[in-house]
């Protein structure tokens, strides 16, 4: 469960001549820039759904992404077969394993970033296996996909100071947005990067590529000011999260003392110091006196999944702080292996962080019991439903994926557990959602509900890409308004399913989000 998907990528060559990431194009008069996912600029939010296991042009596991335009304006299917992609679908590329969105060119239409981390890249007559690639597909008033301006990047073509290498997994994780100053930024995780420090090369130490406007920086634990020590298997860049003032990088393989794969998270802001984003804090179990509960242990994998949202303190006029949640799916509770836990901290501009909540199935008042292989925290999503007011328990919601949990007696059906992490007792208002109870559908064995999860200010997105139910064998995505989850409204869940609503009746792991 440590990797959502696995595979050996196919063979493809990326063109060296691509449009620079910071290049702009003429503003589209009809683009409104009014929502964060508005690819055609009509002021209506659109929905992005991945299927990184999809077969494309006969290539098994090549992967694709669906964009459902809001207002019933159609569905775009984006894969490496789209003209202008400078690539072709190959077996196990897993295009769409990661996705992000932002207005990269400032035209008012949202642009889509898609990772294919298992892409093989041709270089010097060789194929660099699983080197990875990232694509920026630009939105326009006519939509997104066929006809879009598309940029294709390897690590070296994005940042000439780096090298494209086999098994780097460039694009395994993505995060994008705008800084508080209005500059677009993009963070690309490269958890398989080998890092040389002090004459020694550390395999899979990991790094990120950070782009803000025209400035680019490659960042690892050997970069100036970044806490931690470069080590083999740190996997720095495996997970990413961010707001307009901060971003966070998960390294679930980080060793703490002698404990391998204990995990850690590094928090940065969007300003530069010594040529790289400014590191504010290194967070992990056992790294700061009692701030983060628990003890760093081998295999905990703290930071496997991370999520971040804005926080406005009392007396402030803006969201100066952030809430960061980190999942630790390998945490053992009272000797019960891989029960899992999550930690929520508040981050301040100085880099000071404080504990908001430590949650596991044994926490007082929390529904559920510690069970082997639940992987509580395999995926996490935190959201501030109203950033225009002082942050309180009324505005913040946390969803925790538990893909190994039973639903009644159905093994590995999975669940989502909802919390208000600012409650004085996090178990007071928690609730568990499973297929057939809070979520549409029927729970079946090995659905692994909770392995695909994300959230916005208005909605919770729950994908079930490995659904075994006969009605959704190709996967399914459910979108729940937070007000429905709270029980204050009954708007109803929107369900996206292959073969309905204009979506093609095909798929292997439809419903991958987050």
Image (tube, helix red, strand yellow):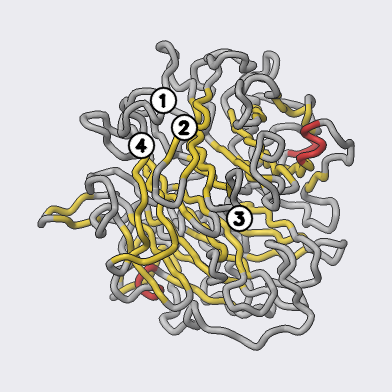
Q: Circles 1 and 2: CB distance less than 8 Å?
A: yes
Which of the two discs, 4 and 2, labels the residue nearer the N terminus? 4
Closer to the chain start, of discs 2 and 3, is 3
Which x, y percent locates residue 495? 80, 44
| Left or right: where 143 falls relative to 53 | right
Query: Upstream in the sequence, badge 3 or badge 4?
Result: 4
Q: Earlier in the sequence, mark 1 or mark 2?
A: 1
Task: Kindly identify which numbered label has been placed on residue 318.
Answer: 3
Residue 135 place in picture, x, y as percent? 53, 69
Residue 287, image x, y percentages = 30, 33
Measured in 3D between alpha carbons, the distance from the residue under mark 3 to the one under mark 4, in whole angstroms, is 32 Å
Mark 4, mark 2: which one is toward the viewer?
A: 2
| Cβ atoms under marks 3 and 4 closer than 8 Å | no
Say if mark 2 contacts mark 3, CB within 8 Å.
no
Measure how far apart labels 1 and 3 are at the Cα level. Answer: 29 Å
Under tag 1, what secondary structure? Answer: loop
Judge whether 358 appears above or below 380 on screen.
above
Q: Residues within 10 Å of mark 2 (few under 14, many from 20)?
A: some
From the image, tell me which residue sits under label 4. 263
């Amino acid at each position: 469960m440590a990797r959502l998907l696995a595979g050996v990528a196919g063979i493809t060559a990326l063109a060296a001549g691509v449009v620079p990431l910071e290049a702009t194009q003429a503003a589209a008069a009809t683009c409104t820039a009014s929502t964060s996912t508005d690819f055609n600029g009509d002021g209506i939010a659109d929905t992005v759904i991945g299927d990184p296991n999809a077969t494309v042009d006969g290539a098994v596991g090549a992967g694709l992404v669906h964009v459902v335009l809001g207002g019933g304006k159609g569905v775009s299917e984006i894969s490496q077969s789209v003209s202008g992609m400078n690539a072709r679908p190959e077996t196990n590329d897993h295009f769409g394993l990661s996705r992000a969105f932002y207005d990269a060119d400032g035209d008012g239409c949202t642009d889509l970033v898609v990772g294919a981390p298992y892409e093989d890249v041709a270089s010097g007559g060789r194929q660099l296996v699983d080197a990875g690639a990232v694509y920026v597909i630009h939105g326009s008033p006519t939509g997104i996909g066929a006809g879009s301006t598309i940029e294709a990047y390897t690590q070296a073509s994005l940042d000439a100071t780096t090298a494209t290498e086999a098994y780097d997994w460039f694009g395994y994780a993505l995060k994008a947005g705008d800084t508080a100053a209005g500059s677009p930024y993009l963070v690309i995780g490269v958890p398989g990067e080998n890092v040389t420090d002090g004459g020694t090369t550390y395999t899979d130490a990991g790094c990120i590529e950070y782009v803000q406007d025209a400035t680019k920086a490659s960042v690892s634990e050997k970069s100036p000011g970044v806490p931690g020590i470069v080590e083999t298997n740190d996997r720095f860049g495996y997970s990413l999260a961010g707001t307009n003032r901060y971003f966070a990088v998960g390294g679930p393989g980080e060793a703490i003392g002698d404990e391998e794969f204990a995990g850690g998270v590094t928090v940065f802001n969007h300003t530069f110091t010594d040529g790289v984003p400014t590191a504010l804090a290194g967070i992990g179990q056992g790294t700061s006196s009692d701030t983060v509960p628990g003890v760093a242990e081998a295999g905990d994998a703290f930071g496997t999944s991370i999520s971040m949202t804005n926080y406005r303190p009392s007396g402030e006029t803006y969201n100066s702080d952030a809430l960061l949640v980190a999942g630790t799916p390998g945490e053992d509770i009272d000797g019960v292996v891989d029960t899992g836990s999550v930690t929520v901290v508040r981050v301040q501009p100085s880099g000071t962080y404080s504990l908001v909540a430590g949650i596991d199935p044994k926490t007082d008042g929390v529904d559920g019991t510690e069970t082997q292989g639940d992987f509580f925290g395999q995926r996490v999503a935190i959201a501030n439903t109203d950033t225009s007011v002082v942050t309180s328990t009324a505005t913040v919601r946390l969803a925790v994926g538990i893909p190994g949990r039973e639903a009644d007696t159905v093994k590995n059906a999975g669940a989502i557990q909802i919390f208000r992490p600012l409650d004085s007792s996090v178990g007071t208002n928690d609730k568990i959602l499973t297929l057939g109870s809070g979520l549409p559908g029927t729970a079946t064995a090995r659905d692994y509900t909770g392995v695909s999860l994300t959230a916005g200010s208005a909605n919770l997105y729950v994908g079930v890409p490995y659904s075994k139910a006969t009605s959704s064998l190709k996967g399914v995505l459910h979108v729940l308004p937070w007000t429905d989850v709270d029980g204050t409204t009954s708007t109803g869940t929107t369900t996206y399913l292959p073969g309905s609503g204009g979506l093609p009746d095909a798929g292997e792991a439809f419903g991958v989000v987050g």
